Amino acid sequence: MRRLIFALVIIVPIIGAAVWVAWFSPWLSVETVQVQISDAPAIAGPLGADEVLAVAAVPVGTPLLRVDVGTVQARVEEIPAVEYAEVSRSWPNEILITIQRRQPVAQVASAGGYDVVDIDGVVIRTVPQVEDGVPVVVATGAGASAAIEVARDLPQWLRPKVELIEAGTRNDVRLQLRNGSVVYWGSVSDPDLKADVLKALLQVRANYYDVSAPGTPATSDLPERPNLDPSMASSLAP
């Protein structure tokens, strides 16, 4: 019994002191908030640490354990340009906010000009006129979601060549190239194969390219959808 009492006399004050240090003491309180932001293309617009800090509203001087990192994360993720955020405690006196920015894939006409959107159709920002960096999408309904998905899947070599993406349905996506040519892309399926076939087709200058069925591609200079060139199909088929 004496040992128990002795232990309690020693341990209880130690535990109390530890709780006080962690929960109330200024020794383990927030002194700095660091922000790390991933890169994004210029068309995504600026996102600075000052904006993040203002939205995060981390109370400097509050003990780290009393900072609700989940609430801070939720506030930061309300910023349109932020895809997701991670908020963590860095002992003894720092909160770290790490941000992954949304990546723009298209510009969609809107009442305010053009909405710069990511793959999920989330509006990152609105610009008054078309800017360089990602294609413009002209589509509605299912066609809009298909066009945005195609925009996401365009390889880096092709993206700068595409000025406009049009679609009436999920199966008739068309690319307007900056040189004036039109690419019949078709559905959202097989984007890598279609891009590889198109890369080969583009070695020949034409007004129209059709990779909607990448195993049987076609080109044409006539003002209509091209028909299959059997010799080209045999040379390009995988």
Image (spheres, rainbow, N blue to C red):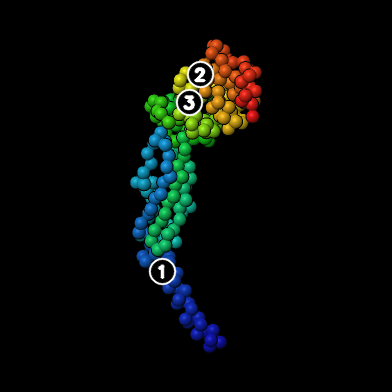
In this picture, is 27 found above or below 208?
below
In this picture, is 94 found above or below 230?
below
Q: Nearer the viewer, residue 215 or 125?
A: 215
Callout 3 amino acid:
Val
Mark 2 or mark 1: whose residue is earlier in sequence? 1
Callout 2 amino acid:
Arg
The residue to which callout 2 is attached is 205
Q: Nearer the viewer, residue 31 or 17?
A: 31
Residue shown at 55% from the left, 26% from the top: 200
**Percent x, y for residue 156?**
49, 33
Quadrant occupied by the N terminus = bottom right
Residue shown at 42% from the left, 42% from the top: 39
The residue to which callout 3 is attached is 162
Mark closer to the observer (2, 1): 2
Callout 1 amino acid:
Val
Quadrant occupied by the C terminus = top right
**Percent x, y for residue 6?**
50, 85
Q: Secondary structure at mark 1?
A: helix
Is residue 24 visible from the viewing direction of this image?
A: yes
Q: Are marks 3 and 1 in contact (CB under 8 Å)?
A: no
Locate residue 107 relative to residue 171 in the image: left or right: left
Residue shown at 36% from the left, 65% from the top: 26
Q: CA distance from mark 3 to mark 1?
A: 59 Å
Q: Quadrant of residue 66?
A: bottom left
Q: Are marks 2 and 3 in contact (CB under 8 Å)?
A: no
**Percent x, y for residue 115?**
44, 30
Is residue 145 visible from the viewing direction of this image?
A: no
Q: Secondary structure at mark 3?
A: strand
User: Mark number for residue 21?
Assistant: 1
Mark closer to the observer (2, 3): 2
Residue shown at 48% from the left, 52% from the top: 70
Q: Residues within 10 Å of mark 1 (few under 14, many from 20)?
A: some
